[in-house]
Amino acid sequence: MRDFRELKVWEKAHCFTLQVYRITKNFPSDERFGLTIQLCRAAASVPTNIAAGSASEVEYQMLLACDLNYIQDETYRELNQQVNEVKRMLNSFIRKLTAQVEKLLERRRNDRSEPWVFVQALYKGYNLK
């Protein structure tokens, strides 16, 4: 899977988001919970959606916090290392689960039993041996 940070469109969206955050710092304080938060959330949603996937979204939000100097570089690197470990584990889990589902589907194609057997096997958590 390609790293979202390698995408030009993500890079442009991220720069735009940083600019929105900088500009909204000068908005009136009575807009802090109105227009300011709306603009920041809307701007951040663009690169976040490009990143896609919960772990990548967290990874981007942490990068944004680091680039806005809300967290220190060292803290960012530590958290980024942790989220990337989670991403690797999730990818491995997804591959394993996909293989199990494919195996189950192949069994179903070769089995002439009732459809509920297939559903029951899915419900039991893909316990295939």
Image (spheres, grey):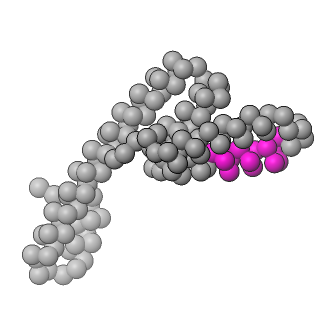
Magenta range: 32-44
The total of numbered circles placed on residues is: 0
Q: Nearer the viewer, residue 86 or 69?
A: 69
Query: Residue at horizontal 74%, vertical 48%?
Result: 39
Give the residue furthest to the left: 110
Rendered view: 4 above or below 70: below
Membership of 40 in magenta stretch: yes
Q: Residue 107, image x and y in percent?
A: 12, 69
Left or right: where does residue 105 sit relative to residue 53? Answer: left
Q: Residue 33, image x and y in percent?
A: 81, 44
| Quarter of the image where the C terminus is located | bottom left
Rendered view: 11 above or below 66: below
Membership of 60 in magenta stretch: no
Query: Residue at horizontal 49%, vertical 37%?
Result: 59
Image quadrant where residue 126 sits: bottom left
Image quadrant where residue 100 sits: bottom left
Q: Residue 17, image x and y in percent?
A: 65, 41
Left or right: where does residue 109 sit relative to residue 70? Answer: left
Rendered view: 50 above or below 107: above
Q: Nearer the viewer, residue 127 or 85?
A: 85
Dominant secondary structure (helix, strand or loop) of the stretch shown in magenta: helix
Q: Can the viewer see residue 109?
A: yes
Query: Residue at horizontal 58%, vertical 19%?
Result: 72
Query: Residue at horizontal 85%, vertical 38%?
Result: 27
Q: Can the viewer see residue 55?
A: no
Left or right: where does residue 92 sit relative to residue 13? Answer: left
Q: Residue 25, image x and y in percent?
A: 80, 34
